[in-house]
Image (cartoon, rainbow, N blue to C red):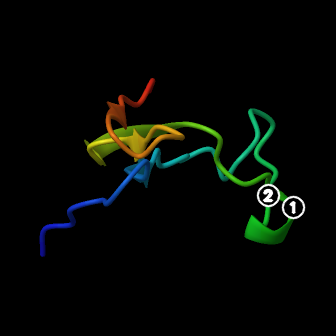
Amino acid sequence: MKLKPLGDRIVVKPKDEDESRTPSGLVIPDTAKEKPQLGEVLAAGPGAWNEAGTDRVALDV
């Protein structure tokens, strides 16, 4: 399935974090982990319209 973002939206694939164990061997449950802040941008929309509604404003990703 292909996604096509509209307007000033983007499609992001979160990076997998395989660090479920600490160096000492402790297992960290998913509920104790922070949500991922890194990802790969798969697609970007064409941008939003300016205030006058005449031109598109490009996205800065």
Task: Give the CA separation, mark 1 to mark 2.
Answer: 7 Å
- Name the residue at the right extreme: 32
- Residue appearing at x 76%, y 40% in the figure: 22
The residue nearer to you, when weighing 8 against 12, is 8
Residue that label 1 marks: 32
Looking at the picture, which amino acid does disc 1 mark?
Answer: Ala
The residue nearer to you, when weighing 60 against 43, is 60
Q: Position of residue 7 (x, y in %)?
A: 37, 54
- Name the residue at the top extreme: 60
Q: Position of residue 15 (x, y in %)?
A: 46, 44
Looking at the picture, which amino acid does disc 2 mark?
Answer: Ile
- Residue 13 is left or right of residue 2, and the answer is right
- Residue appearing at x 21%, y 62% in the figure: 4
Q: Which element is circle 2 on?
A: loop
Verify CB contact (< 8 Å) between mark 1 and mark 2. Answer: yes
Residue that label 2 marks: 28
Q: Is residue 42 above or below residue 32?
A: above
Of tags 1 and 2, the one toward the viewer is 1
